Amino acid sequence: MPATADGPGTAGATGELDPEDAKLVTLAHSAMARGRTTSGAAVRDAIGRTYAAAGVELPSLRLTALQAAVAAAVSSGAEGLEAAAVAGRESTLAEEDRALLDDVGATTVLLVAPDGSVSG
């Protein structure tokens, strides 16, 4: 059974998450709720800074939550990412999001279901 994150720095009853990964899970889930969208994402750069974003759906601009979070990190000077968490209904990443993670070197990817369960 997949892990769940009960809050920042904690691991769920069904599995063990690193405290920093649990933080990403919480940030991604919060970004989804705050943005009132179907997805949220959070990323951690090589020096531990975190960035979170919801998906963007405007008539002239569409970004997945992961694209928005990565754009925030890169535009803030992050030279590479080590981890990402993506919250939403999808059980897999879209091909463009997989390619984006390859571009920035993220090696840990966590998928967060609406109920907070984590896989990846």
Image (tube, rainbow, N blue to C red):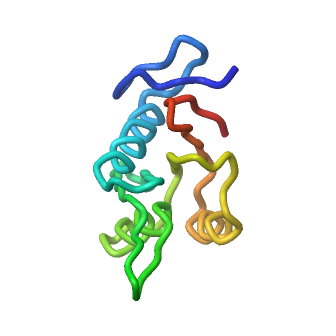
Q: Is residue 72 positioned above or below 119 on the image?
A: below
Total marks shown come to: 0
Q: Is residue 6 positioned above or below 81 on the image?
A: above
Q: In which quarter of the image is residue 26?
A: top left
Q: Position of residue 64 (x, y in %)?
A: 50, 67
Q: Is residue 112 positioned above or below 115 on the image?
A: below
In the rendered view of the protein, which quadrant contains the N terminus? top right
Residue drawn at x 41%, y 62% is 69
In the rendered view of the protein, which quadrant contains the C terminus? top right
Residue drawn at x 28%, y 49% is 34
Left or right of residue 91: residue 49: left
Q: In front: 107, or 54?
A: 54
Q: In front: 24, or 103?
A: 24
Residue drawn at x 42%, y 51% is 42
Q: In front: 106, or 68?
A: 68
Residue drawn at x 50%, y 27% is 18
